Structures are given as C-alpha cells and as structure tokens.
Image (cartoon, grey):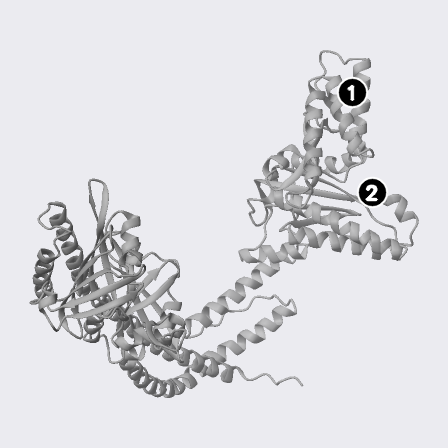
Amino acid sequence: MLRRPRTLRVRLLTILLYLTFLTVFGMGLSGFIHVRNTADDLTGKLLDQTSQRIDHRIDDLVHTATSQGDINLHLLKAKQLSPDDFDHMAGYWNEVLQVRRTMSNIYLTREADGTSLVVANLPSRGLTIQEQRPGRKKGETDVFNFRPEDYPRRALNPVADVVRGRPDLDQRTWAWYKAARDAKRSVWVDTYLFPDETGAPSYPGVTYASPLYRDGKLVGVLGIDFDAFVLCRYLAGIDVSENGYAFVVEQRGRNRQLIAHPRPEVLLRQTRRPGGARATELAPLDDLEDRLVVDFLAQVPGDIDPETLRGTYSIRFQHDGRTYLGVYRGLEEEKGTAPRWLICIVLPEDDVLANAKRNLLWGALIGVGVLLLAALLSVVTAGQVARPLEELARDTEAIGRFELDPRPTGHSMVREVDRLACATEDMKASLRSFRKFVPAELVRKVLASGKEAVLGGNHRRLTIYFSDIADFTTISESMSPESLVAHLGEYLQAMSEQVLAAGGTVDKYIGDAIMAFWGAPLENAGHALAACTAAVRNQQLLRKLRERWQAEGKPPFRARIGINTGEVIVGNIGSAARLNYTVIGDAVNLASRLEGLNKYYDTEVLIAEATYEEAHDGIVARPIDWVSVKGKSEAVLVYELLGLKGEVGLDMEEFAELFGRALQAYRRQDWTGALELFGTALKQRPDDEPVREMVRRCEMYRAEPPGTDWDGVHRMTSK
C-alpha cells in the first residue's frame, strides 16, 4: 500500500526539527567529546607523571644495587677485600646494609667449593650473617646463621642456627649464579623467590649478579638483592585515582610475570609439591587473582622490548563491562643496565569522566528546551519557504512535460529558494538548446554547462572509435526488415552500453556502424586506454552474444573496430535548427580506415600508433604493419589490440613480442631472419592471417628483392 505524500509544510517542519535536533545533539556530543579529550589529555599527563615517579623510585633501587655491586667488585679486584676473608667482608657488608635499607642481601659464592657468604636483612630476623658450606654428602649444603655481633665465633655462640644436610642449596646451580657466569659480565636476573633462613622459597626479589675474575679465572659471583615487597609498599602509597593503581611487570621474552602490586599477596600462590608439602611460588598470569592486570596486559604487544621503549604508551580496554584507561612504559636506564620491567597504571574511565557525564546530562536538558523553541520558529519558517517552493514545483512539472517557455522569475525572501528559482530558469534555457541534439547521453553531459548551444568548435586531442559489422550486407539480405531492425538494435544497444561504461560519447550510428569518441565534452586524460577498454569489452560481450544468437537461430554478428588518437575539431556542427556535437578531422578519417583495414588482415581491433603510445601501459598489442591507407600518403604503424594487461596470458604477450621482433627484421629487409621468426610465430598460431601474410611477403621479397626506394610501407588502394 502506497503512503500518501505529505505536504511541503509538514516536510519542511520535519526537516527543520531534525536539523535542530541534530544540531543540539551534535553540539552536546561535541562538548562531551571536547571534555572527554581534555580529561584524557590531563589524565594522560597525570599518568605519565605518576609513571615517571615510579620509574625514578625504581631507578633509585636499581642504581643503589648496581653502584654497590660495582664497589664490591672493585674492592675485591683491588684486594682491599678478599674472597677468602669472610670475616672482613661480613663486617663491611653489614655496615652497608645498615645504611642502604632498600637492599635485602649481599653475598659471594666461590666457584671452587661453592661456599657462600650471605649478609641478609631477613624480614623475620633483621640483619643476619649466613654461611653455606658443602655438606658431608655430595649434593648437600650446611647452612649456618649468625647474629652480626656473634660472627664468626659460632662455637662460642649458643644461639647460632645450624641447618645441616640441606639439599639443592649449592648457589652455583642457581639461576643468578649461572646467568652472571655465562654472560661474563654483571646482569640482572629475572625475579624469583628468595629463600628464608632455612633455604625455603619465601618472598619475591631480584638479583644483580657480577662475576669476579682474577688472572682470567672465575673466582666466584657476587650478588645483591632487593625484595619486591619494598616496591609493593611504595606502589600502595601512590594515589592514582579513587579506583586506580600501579603495578610492575617483568618481560621474559614473550612471557610476563607480575612482580610488584599494591597488594603483595597477589604476587604469590600456594601449591603442593609431590608428597603433599605446601610450597610458595610466583603466581603466573593465568592463575593471577587480579584479572584486571591480565586484561590490561592482553592489550600490550607481546613482543615489545622494555629496554627500547621511550615515553609512555596509552591504551583503552574493557574489563567486566567497564572501560578502563591504562599506560605502560619501560625503565629509562640505558640498555642492559636495568631489569626488563614495564611500569603499568590502570584506572576506570569513570574516575575521569564522571563530571563530563553530569555536564552532558545538563546539556541534554538544555537541548530539549532549545528544541521546543526551535519547533515554534520552524513552523513560521516552513510557511515562508513552502509558498515559493509550491510555485517551483508547478514549474518543474511543466519542465517534465518539456514545456520550456520562459516566465518571470519570482523572488523569495529565502536566499536558497530564490537561487533555486533562478537555477530553474537557467535549466530551462539549457534544455531549449540541447533538445536540438539527438544523442540523449550527450544532452545529459552538456546540460551541466547551463548554457545554450551555439555553432562552433575547438581543437582537442581525442580518441576516435569506429566499429562495423562484418558482412552485414549479406546478413541483411537473409533477414526480414523487422527481424533485422530488432537484431541490429540489440547489437547497437549492447555495444553502446560498453562505450558509455568506459566514459565514451556515442556520436552517431551509420547504418550498422558506430562512431564514438573519448575526451569530450568531458575531459579524460586516459581517453586512449578507455577506448581500448571499450573495444576489448565489446569483443568479449559479442562472443557471449554470438553463442545465444546461434542458439536462437539468429546471425552471429562479428564486429571490426578501428581506433585512432589525434588532434580534431570537436564542437557543435550543423545549423541553428539542428546541431550535431561531433568531431571532424584527419584523425577521424584514419580511425575509419583502420576499421576497414581489419578485413585485409583478418583482425578484430586495429589501433593507430598514437593510440598505442598513450595506452600501452594498460594494453597488450602487437605491431601489424606500416600502412599507408587510401587517401593518405603518410604511413602509420598499425597495432592489433590483443587485450588488457592482466587479462591475457603470458603466452599472448610472448607472441606479441615475437611478432614485433619479426616485423623489425622485415623492415630491415632481413628476409631470412624475419622468415625464421615469423615461422616460429606461425607454429604457435597456424591460423593467424597477419603472420601468414608476412611470411608470403618475406618469401616474395627474398626471391625478388624490392628496389632501393622500398620503405617497408604497405600501401592500400581500397578502403
């Protein structure tokens, strides 16, 4: 059921209300976006500053460890400390840990026997000195714990702790020792669980390990630790936002490990070892209690290198149905001098945009009021616009009936309506001119000028296209006039559509022939390639139509096409009563001659050299011959259009190249070389008439060479 059209006033009122609504909505949305962007910008700066504060704190920890490690190494190399004098080293390191409270442990493990000296600041005991020595059995280690004031007089100290026969505590087998020994330089080791005084993994920390060499031989490895809980306590004091917080992640290749969090318990999980004993380990991401951290890290590229990151990177992501903002950055230390850590910060977007959303609500309420006021004004405006538009509607209906008599132009108080009335009169003037033209598609193009047509033309470089049906006279004698007209009409319609689809102008139909051109009235820089494209598409379409026509018992039309590019005169030719927008000139005549030349060479599409030069990047063609057509003394190189680049096989391109080389040999009067090349081409395409024609000529000229004035041009004596 068709809906009844609404009145102009109702439509205008609806449009005005829509526009007002969109304007109010757009302004409100724009304001919200502006506030949001501002909030995002401020938040980004705040998060960047916060991440820098955390970075500086970590830098302090890292620098403290690396500087003390370098000092220890220097003292040992300078023999101010000795790896065999544990008493002296323990006293010095004990004083260091009392000053540098951020460090947890300082220790040395000797390569020769695996004996270790550890000065530790244990969470449960405070400062403690520990020695680890090989046990009675292979693979066992004895652990001796001392209070600093009692070391090394263990035998005189009844409260010293002794743990004997501890398996797998040989420090030489631990990751920190092997990493420094293999690297042969100071390294930061991935975060792991530090052992307590009994050697059991207890709390997370990181180690800075340095190998000690004397005379090129490894003496042992020095280590300095600080536990991650120091950093956790610092992060807990960072005020990011009401619900935001910061954490630190360690990059391990493509894997990651959470190593610092405002809630330290998140870092660890309890597991059971074989036999049922409970053990503590770092919680992997898959088993992490804080899933917000997991969702955040899912947005961070897995293959990034924290050591090469510069600056802060922002992301926005979803977690439990809420939008979160986040940033991450690497440490600003030089590459290789700091752990491969990412400083990360997350916070809910609502912590930032709560005020913006309240402002949006107020804006919406104000917008509703503005919309109501706009409705009243729209009613008045619709009436002012509708009356002159109704007059224009009646005038437009007259134009639809081709009643083009001029009338006085009415004026409206609305500028756009007034301009529309003037434009309507200009359109009528143009239609009065272009109704003199026959081709409807040409009229549609020229209407855009808004001017009345007059006699005249101008010089322009165009591409001209002629096509004709082969043996049309014979075909027409076998059909009734009615059938012939219908059959020819289907052919002309199909061919013309391809010309128009390629941007061409159908000039005229001359019986069964079609004349078209490209580059006018609308300019087209690729007019040569467009004409070639139309020719290829027409031949492709004709092959399909011939199959259907044969099945229907109709004659299968075959078309010959000639294309040339050159300077012509294009414009309005004729009289004041009847104009024809067409082209004239020598280039037009050559295109017509090329169409007829197809019959001589048994080809479908021939193009002039000028067309080939402009379109060769997009087509595949072979040179056929140097020809002087009837009515022209100047010779032209004629090409056969074989197809479009990318649509023909490699064998076709190779054949075209082979024929071209053979033709060059022919032009040089190298009859034997030309016959050899043409013979190869004939084996590839035995039915190719141009090849056979050139073979006949070469054999003739080899038997009876031409005179000295022979220029290789074939002169046609007929059309």
Q: Is residue 330 left or right of residue 596?
A: left
Q: Residue furthest top?
A: 708
- How many numbered circles does the render carry? 2
- 27 relative to 207 in the view: left or right: right
What is the crowding at mark 2: few (fewer than 14 residues within 10 Å), some, or many (at least 20)?
some
The residue lying at 82 percent from left, 23 percent from top is 696
Q: Residue 448 appears at what percent x and percent y?
A: 55, 57
Residue under label 2, please give it.
470
Q: Where is residue 39 in the image (x, y as percent from the top left)?
A: 27, 73
C-alpha span from label 1 to label 2: 29 Å
The residue tagged 1 is: 698
Nearest the eye: 61 or 359: 61
Residue 578, can we see it? no
Element on which disc 2 rests:
loop
Q: Can residue 53 be seen in this view?
A: yes
Q: In this view, does 598 lie above or below 93?
A: above
Image quarter of residue 382: bottom left
Q: Is mark 1 on a helix, strand or loop?
A: helix
The residue drawn where x is 27% and y is 59% is 171
| Amino acid type assigned to the residue bearing label 2 in the image | Ala
